[in-house]
Amino acid sequence: MVRVLLRFNKDLVQEPVTSQIIIDHKTPVNILSARITPLGGEMLVEIDSRTSETIIGAFRSKGVIVDVSSLIEKDKELCIECGACVSLCPSGALYHAPDHSIGLEPEKCSGVTCSLCLDACPRRALHLTK
Amino acid sequence: MKELVESSGLQVAYDEVDVVTTGTQGAMCSSGALINVGHAEPPIKIDKAWINDVPIPHPGAAVDLYIGAAVASETRGFEYGGGHVIEDLIAGKEVDFRATAYGTDCYPRTRVETTLTKGDLNQFILLNFRNGYQRYSCATNGRAETIYTYMGKLLPRYRNATYSGAGEISPLNNDPDYETIGLGTRIFLGGAPGYILGEGTQHNPRGQLGTLMVKGDAKQMSPEYINGASFTKYGPSIYVGLGIPIPILNKGIVEKVAIRDRDIPTDIVDYGVPSRNRPTLRETNYEELKSGRVEINGRSVKVTSMSSLKQAYKISNELKRWIEEGTFTLTKPIERLPLDTSIGPMKHPVEEGD
């Protein structure tokens, strides 16, 4: 699966963009998190890696901004393995490993649509990937 | 050691083990470093000083300064503070130093500006007024909005909780009667040998909340164990790596070092109430806290540590290695920490309109 962030402007949120792409391409799109207002919105979705190129192209042709990487990453040099981030992570992407270090499973991370951990790291070791 | 006592009993543990090492690495705001920057020509009696734009208090003679870990930068705010200055100096980095003065007959200079590394300092002594808290409250937040505290970011309506302290491997929990700990005890501090100077501020042994005042030569320390920290909307601080060896002098000490996380209780406290007397929601213990989930108001919520358990284990192992190699020897305290004191609140302050 490929995880992508879709950004919709205020005109696009009036249209059933995602549903139309699902129908047209007969492909499932797994919505992990969404924040939509009349002014625009963001959705983190998972799409099948075999059709990802076509689907990303379809979203882009409708004017959606597709960001393929905006998840949390951890700077190993800065992290002191405290855990200030772990209780904030709703998806379990950040966790205490059995050896007491702080693990990060990017495939579980909701990235920019969540970001709860970002300002909680006392070492500023967490960032959104560029 | 704890497992040995459980599996083989006190006598075997007493016969087999000479020393138990402990460790902790948590954020301790009441930390800092005493520095002597040497005299300029002509000399200056410093009135105000800054390192990397962090104000550096000047509590004593002409060129003695105290880098307070919790002091924030005037240009970068909470993102950089005294704790970061100390870490940068320990790491061998060059820092920008400037100072002003009113000028005296013997110290005529009124301004000075230079760059410094730890090699340029006559003394660079980590001197912490309060470290090594025996245990600490578990924090949560009952308010309708997220709050930012020294116990980290707390989500609304008790949706997460944080705690601090290494529990069963934390130093003071392994010698709660301070039989081996006091003035003169040689310890692991920031990756180098250090010493206990006595009780720390807010030392409260009656409440099982003992604290330590410690010092050590920061020039020998390592940035692996001394880390500047920024707490959003709270301020800068510093993580201090500290380890204490506990010599097994008698069977009573064996019993004490056998303490487990489940034997160390603490309260879950609502930090959403901004009062000196924050309400306690319930009692918990370090075993439950380390499990990663704790029950609050009938709901299981995520709880995590603000101090580094990984570092705590690393410190206790490193100290063990020093002792085995013979590079670190144990000392007997000259005076033990007080056991019978407690702390009080501030005398009723004068309020507006009083």
Image (tube, rainbow, N blue to C red):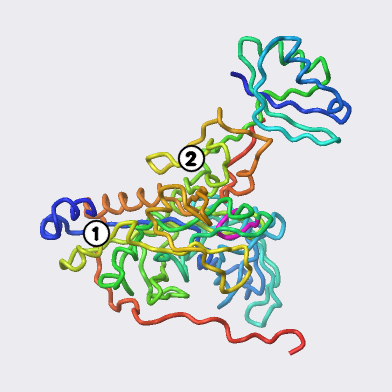
Direction from residue B65 to residue B163 in the image, left or right: left
Direction from residue B237 to residue B253 in the image, left or right: left
- Asked if badge 2 and badge 1 are on a common chain, one would say no
Residue B298 within the magenta-colored segment of the rendering:
no
The answer to whether residue A121 of the structure is visible from this angle is yes
The stretch of residues the image draws in magenta is B147-153
User: Residue sitting at 59 percent across and 41 percent down?
Assistant: A126
Direction from residue B197 to residue B327 in the image, left or right: left
Place residue B103 in its image quadrant.
bottom right
Q: Name the residue carrying label 1.
A: B258
Q: Position of residue B171 (x, y in %)?
A: 34, 62
Q: Name the residue carrying label 2.
A: A95
Q: CA distance from mark 2 to mark 1?
A: 28 Å
Between A49 and B240, the one lying in front of the other is: A49
Other-residue count near label 2 (Cα within 10 Å), few / some / many at <14 / 14–19 / ≥20: many
Quadrant of the drawing holding the C terminus of chain A: top right
